[in-house]
């Protein structure tokens, strides 16, 4: 598990480093990264719309990735290997958004929407920092979560039965 955590942390730090270098080059070194200075309004609209839709769909997906049944089953069976696989996917999705949005911010000539999308992605990153405690909790949560959900369902059934019986006795 320690090796998996180190790999995920290295990937996390690398994506932050790439985004930081991109930001420093664009803001402080004032490198001209404008690729489409004469983009038409329709090109800007399409690019902005696509990135907004990608960002607002991929961020919740990546944050809830470990809640999906297939991922849960894989984490139960293979623990560290599955955590490496799915954790890498999660970090790559968020890292791609974190690098592409600032890049498009500079490429379209300081289009502020891409900057806001990068900030939203940056605000989501603390929820996926691959610390050792979080890695162990993600694997352990799966085991505890499956039994807890079964227990909750059983309790709800008994409460519903008790309510139905009490309402019948009143009649």
Image (cartoon, grey):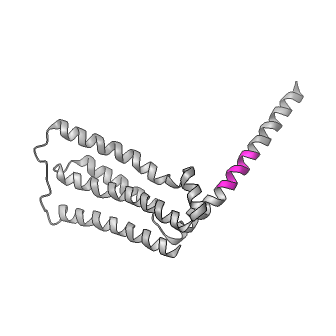
Please name whichever residue, 139 or 29, is drawn nearer the observer in this view of the structure. Answer: 139
Residue 118 location (% of width, % of height): 31, 54
Residue 104 location (% of width, % of height): 22, 51
Magenta stretch in the rendered image: 146-154
Give the total number of marks visible in the rendering.
0
Of all residues, the one furthest to the top in this rendering is 171
Up the image or down, 140 lies above or below 119; here it is below
Residue depicted at 54% across the width and 70% down the height: 133
**Relative side of 101 to 62, left or right:** left
Up the image or down, 47 lies above or below 100; here it is above
Please name whichever residue, 41 or 4, is drawn nearer the observer in this view of the structure. Answer: 4
Residue 131 location (% of width, % of height): 49, 70
Residue depicted at 41% across the width and 60% down the height: 91
Residue depicted at 30% across the width and 50% down the height: 116
**Relative side of 9 to 39, left or right:** right
Residue 63 sits inside the magenta stretch: no
**Relative side of 93 to 127, left or right:** left
Up the image or down, 84 lies above or below 54; here it is below
Residue 148 sits inside the magenta stretch: yes
Of all residues, the one furthest to the left in this rendering is 38
> Which SS does the magenta portion mostly show?
helix
Residue depicted at 47% across the width and 59% down the height: 86
Q: Quadrant of the C terminus?
A: top right
Residue 56 location (% of width, % of height): 38, 45
């Amino acid at each position: 598990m320690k090796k998996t955590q180190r790999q995920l942390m290295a990937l996390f730090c690398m994506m932050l480093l790439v985004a930081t270098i991109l930001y420093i080059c664009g803001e402080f070194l004032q490198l001209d990264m404008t690729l489409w200075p004469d983009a038409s309004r329709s090109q800007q609209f399409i690019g902005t719309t696509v990135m907004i839709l990608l960002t607002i769909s991929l961020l919740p997906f990546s944050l809830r990735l470990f809640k999906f049944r297939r991922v849960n089953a894989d984490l139960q069976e293979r623990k560290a290997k599955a955590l490496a696989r799915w954790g890498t996917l999660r970090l790559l999705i968020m890292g791609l958004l974190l690098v592409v949005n600032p890049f498009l911010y500079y490429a379209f000539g300081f289009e502020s929407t891409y900057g806001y999308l990068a900030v939203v992605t940056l605000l989501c990153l603390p929820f996926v920092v691959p610390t050792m405690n979080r890695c162990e909790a993600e694997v352990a949560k799966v085991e505890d979560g499956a039994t807890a959900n079964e227990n909750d369902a059983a309790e709800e059934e008994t409460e519903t039965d008790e309510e139905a019986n009490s309402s019948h006795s009143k009649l």
